Image (spheres, helix red, strand yellow):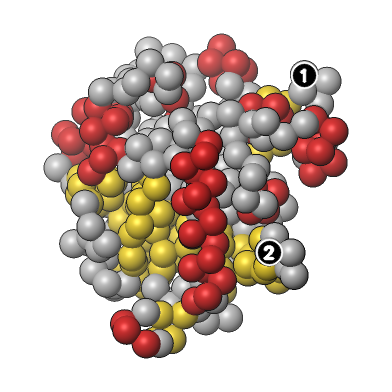
Amino acid sequence: MQLWSITGNSQKLDGGAMFGNAPRALWARWAPPDAQNRIDLACRALLATPVNGKTVLFETGIGAFFEPKLRERYGVVESDHVLLDSLAQAGFSHEDIDVVVLSHLHFDHAGGLLAPWAEGQSPRLLFPNATFVVGAQHWARAKVPHPRDRASFIPGLPDLLEASGRLEIVEGEHSQALGEAVRFTFSDGHTPGLMLAEIVGPVEVADGATQGGVAFCADLIPGRFWVHVPITMGYDRNAELLIDEKRAFLEDALAREVRLFFTHDTDCALATVTRDEKGRFGTADEVAVLVAQPLAA
């Protein structure tokens, strides 16, 4: 199996919102803000093949579906669909993707499913040959959003996914599309039913567990700076729950040598988990870009 980090459209969001109750004096050292207090964010996808015999894309980033006024409001930098260009650079097109795994359906993770905005045209799904894999609890949230995060969802996207006839709703650890090659766990701190995908590692250990896999951290851990357990986002629905979930997730990743893949970190795609003598989590062996990297490397 080989892995690619696939760059999508980048975004600028308010640094205070991205770092929750952390003081600006702290987070500004990690992510220097611009004059509007916005920080740079990546929207990075993970491409893996073969996974259960399939070519799989984990998330699609924010894409280019916003009309110009909304693109500016939400800080989307590029007007072109960068994900499609990045796939082409890796030797793939969106037609080559067999499965798209979606941790959740907020627009900065699922917007890349849609064709670029064009005057007078209705939203249109890309990835015509892909099965779309979504967690059941979050699917229910996306169908009937809460007022707190309604603006984070793309109107009409659930209808398009259902109409495709290629939607798979997942409730347990595995999906029909990917079998036991990908293991799913779920988190509720950021949004109900956030689905965390782990490409199962090649090394089997006791009681059926494996080592050496790669976990797509989604918005449980958007990047390296959020590995520090107390750091959460203002966008998280329940910061205390997320902290507890993140601690358990990192302890498990450290014990099983599972590497972390970050979607929003501008400079790091993949890293290993560390823990110092005081018990603070961190990262090491940081990799900025993956190009046909073997899973076991």
Place of residue 84 in the rendered image (x, y in percent of width and height, measured from the top left): 49, 45
Q: Name the one closer to the observer, 185 or 180.
A: 185
* Amino acid under disc 1: Gln
Q: Is residue 266 visible?
A: yes
Q: Nearer the viewer, mark 1 or mark 2?
A: 2
Q: Is residue 96 visible?
A: no
Please tell me which of labels 1 and 2 falls first in the chain.
1
For the C terminus, give its image quadrant. Answer: bottom right
Question: Which residue is at 30% across, 58% downward?
Answer: 98
Tell me the residue that label 1 is attached to.
Answer: 36
**Relative to 155, is 286 on the left or the right?**
right
**Percent position (x, y) of residue 219?**
51, 44
Asked whether the residues under the numbered discs 1 and 2 touch, taking CB atoms below 8 Å apart as contact, a structural biologist would say: no
Element type at mark 2: loop
Q: Residue drawn 77% across and 38% down? A: 27
| Image point (41%, 64%), residue name | 198
Q: Which mark is residue 279?
A: 2
The residue drawn where x is 30% and y is 30% is 142
Which label was assigned to residue 188? Answer: none
Mark 1: few/some/many CA within 10 Å (<14, 14-19, 20+): few
Residue closest to the eye, 5 or 116: 5
Above or below for 43 versus 68: below
Q: Report the amino acid beneath label 2.
A: Gly
Residue 227 pos. (x, y %) = 64, 53
Q: Disc 1 and disc 2: Cα gap in Å?
A: 35 Å
